[in-house]
Image (tube, helix red, strand yellow):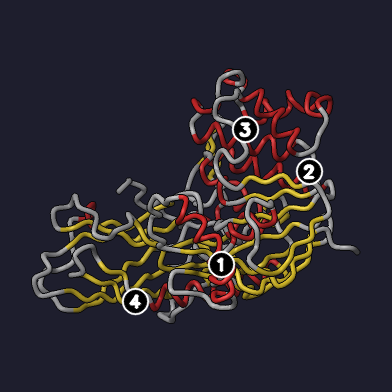
Amino acid sequence: MKPIIKVENLSKQYRIGAPKEAYTTLRDTIAGAVRAPFNALGRNGRSGKNTIWALRDVSFEVVPGEVVGIIGRNGAGKSTLLKILSQITEPTTGQVEVYGRIASLLEVGTGFHPELSGRENIFLNGAILGMKRAEIARKFDEIVAFAETEKFIDTPVKRYSSGMLVRLAFAVAAHLEPEILLVDEVLAVGDIAFQKKCLGKMDDVAKKGRTVLFVSHNTSAVQKLCQRAIWLGSGRIRRDGACGEVLENYLHEMRDNLGSDKLMSRDRDFTIANVRTLGQDGEEDQAFMTGENLRVELDYECAKTFPGAYLYVAIANRETVLFAANMCLDGCRIPAGEESGKLSVTFKELPLAPQQRYYIKVGGRASDNRTPLFEDSDIEVGVIQVVGSTADIHLNGEASELLISDSSSVLVPYEWDFGKGRVRNIESFKNVKLLDHRSF
């Protein structure tokens, strides 16, 4: 099948830290124009100290109807790649061939004129995509309903919140029937309900045979939406293949890097040197069962003058923190003045739904219980996979594990009351205890 996107030896170089240019005279401008060819000749093939390669020798093909996830750490070159495909910026070397109409959602407000109303921007974006006015008018009501901006459709978009703006921008990009849809992490601006709505719409777009390139740090969303993934690292393709395999390799390396990196406090007097997750047998592991114990161990180092601190260890999915062990609430803290030590927390009878990935986060507060201990409020230090359950769960003779994991991440005891008698939840989970869900 002929590719709809073909990328060959693509590279992009940026200048960084360039000083602000001073005002120039006519003589300086003429002299600069004369010197320019010689300066370019001298720079050819060399990257100076004030340049960086955002992409380097990237090559791949995408066939029509393919849904491809682009993953990688911050600064890997993901957004640069989409900007080149959208013809927002030009490559330094290499070439891109695109055979189809592209709609892109790369940054909040991209392609929108702030002085125009939402209605006018819908027609403007449609015209930019090459659509006729009648085509846009036919989709107009559907776009507005999806974006949930009916009351504000005739208001200039400069008065929209970032959430409203991204809702309208995504609705326009997804409903005006492009052959290729490019979506960056900008969807993280919207609320969780709208993110799920957007993922559903992208799935519908893909099922209609259109091509989608999806950049996201939400590996669960990438796994659900994409059949193929391209992992970028330092501007190069690290791996390109089946989505599950590429994500597994990416998460494995991310976990290894997080385990080896040191987390330093703001004043550098306290350092978490290592984080490990252990199973019930005491062995280090990243795969767990619902109902098992999960133990998180931390090695720390601190200065003799360190006054102590309160830590918390949280379990989260990509949307939110699910629960945490918090020293502030438990009336304990890291001892002051110890040069090094080890602490651990055990989550009893893990109440997490199977067939999902979860993330270990660490944060803390200084001894005054107000100042954040680290620069970020919490830091992701590990990934675990819940692969199944210690209980043999069946409902009406059929495995119900998928139903549970689709409806909730956390499993807690509950009971139904029909007036005549109480019916408990699945008996196999009667030993699952409700953990402390207080905020921290």
How far apart are labels 1 and 2 at the CA level? 29 Å
- Left or right? Give the position of 186 relative to 57: left
User: From this viewpoint, is residue 262 visible?
Assistant: yes
The residue at the point 56 percent across, 67 percent down is 13
In the rendered structure, which amino acid carries the disc numbered 1?
A: Gln
Which of pointers 4 and 3 indicates the residue nearer the eye?
3
Task: Locate residue 175: give its quadrant.
Answer: top right
* Image spot of residue 279 (x, y percent): 44, 75
Q: Is residue 386 visible?
A: no
Q: Which mark is residue 274?
A: 4
Residue 370 percent location from the top left of the image: 19, 49
Sequence-wise first label, 1 or 2: 1
- Local SS, label 1: strand
Residue furthest toward the front? 27
Q: Marks 4 and 2, Cα distance to the nearest angstrom?
A: 47 Å
Query: Which of the two marks, 1 or 2, is nearer to us in this view?
Result: 1
Report the residue marked by disc 2. 178
4 or 1: mark nearer the eye: 1
Q: Of callouts 1 and 3, which one flags the residue occurring earlier in the amino acid sequence?
A: 1
State how far apart marks 4 and 3 are (Cα).
44 Å
In front: label 1 or label 3: 1
Which amino acid type is shown beneath numbered disc 3? Answer: Leu
Report, in whole angstroms, how far the alpha carbon at label 4 lies from the one at label 1. 36 Å
Q: Work out whether 218 lies above or below 296.
A: above
Q: Earlier in the sequence, mark 4 or mark 1?
A: 1
Residue 13 circle label? 1
Q: Which residue is mark 3?
A: 168
Q: Cα distance, mark 1 to mark 3?
A: 32 Å
Q: Nearer the viewer, residue 237 or 275?
A: 237
Left or right, 366 with reference to 288: left
Q: Is disc 1 surrounded by few (<14), some (14 to 19) or many (20+) residues within 10 Å?
A: some
Identify the residue at the far right of this view. 1
